[in-house]
Image: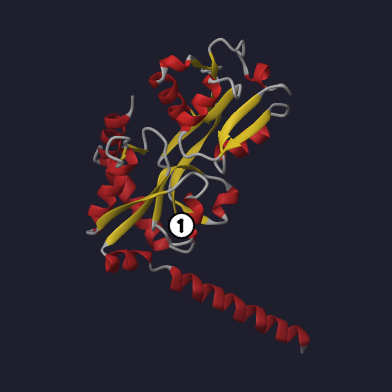
Amino acid sequence: MRQTFSLVTAAAAALLCATAAFAADDKIQKIVDNGTLRVCHAEAAPWGVKDPASGEWVGSDIRAAAHLAETMGVGIEHVDATWATLIPSLEADKCDIAMAPIFRSAERAMRVLFTEPTGYETMGVAVRGDSGIASYADLDQADKTVAVISGSADEAFASRFFKNAKIQALVTDKISTLGIEAASRRVDAFLTDTSTLRSVVGANEAMNLTIIEPDNPLNPQGYSYALPMGEYGFQQLVNIWQINTDQQGLKQKWHDEFAQ
């Protein structure tokens, strides 16, 4: 009798979970009813950065977000986030989708749904040109410090990759802050995705920064948009929309507009 009761209880629990999952799969209707697609962004060039003059978001993912909203027949609201708050913002219903180059990981997949990859990226490291550091091995020393953005995939990777160097996680949403720390010799290096790294180094010649082992980038993987858990209908919509924008050449057009 006890075993039968346990089986019935387990079946009922499974049914409740399934019902809850289906009940949660209503994001498209909520967006349409609200008349607005709320999109979270975190700074990363060329995908999305805040224009210091206007305070407005600009970048390829900003173009993409506007097109997705237009496709759904709704308005657009860009929501400020940082790399540490992108996923919590989704969980707290502050936005409907996070559109940034978010590296996919099993840990993150326990909290959000990922779309199909929007692209593929690697990571890299920059140091001062006069630092004497020419390789990852030179940097991975007990007296060296590598800066990363707190709460980012960069922090998790750096902590695994560097066995001896100190990892300093900075609470900021601007990669340029890491560059300033390295240029000012407060840290020996900083790590981020390769595209953003090249942008920061190229746009700030006065900082005298250089990328080490540029022909040997780290941690190649796909990055994606993120959606709230359970929203499989919305996930399918975004995936199909991505295919269509790629076929129409829009994805490449947006990238070329903001890539340096």
Q: Secondary structure at mark 1?
A: helix
Question: In the rendered image, which quarter is residue 258 located in?
Answer: top left
| Residue 201 image position (x, y, % from top left) | 44, 20
| Residue 228 image position (x, y, % from top left) | 46, 59
Q: Is residue 181 left or right of residue 250?
A: right
Q: Which residue is mark 1?
A: 90
Graded by Cα atoms within 10 Å as few (under 14), some (14 to 19) or many (20 or more), the crowding at tag 1 reads: many
In percent of the image, x 33 and y 46: which residue is there?
Answer: 242
| Residue 85 image position (x, y, % from top left) | 50, 50
Query: Is 123 placed above or below 83 here?
Result: above
Q: Is residue 188 left or right of residue 237?
A: right
Residue 136 visible in the current orientation? yes
In percent of the image, x 47 and y 39: which residue is there?
Answer: 173
Colouring rule applied to residues: secondary structure
The N terminus sits in image quarter: bottom right
User: Label 1 sits on what residue type?
Assistant: Leu
Q: Is residue 64 left or right of residue 176?
A: left
* Total tally of numbered discs in the picture: 1
Residue 228 visible in the current orientation? no
Task: Out of 45 and 50, give the one closest to the viewer.
Answer: 50
The C terminus sits in image quarter: top left
| Residue 45 image position (x, y, % from top left) | 39, 33
Query: Is 109 placed above or below 173 here?
Result: below
Residue located farthest toward the bottom when viewing the structure as drawn: 1
In percent of the image, x 27 and y 54: which residue is there?
Answer: 76
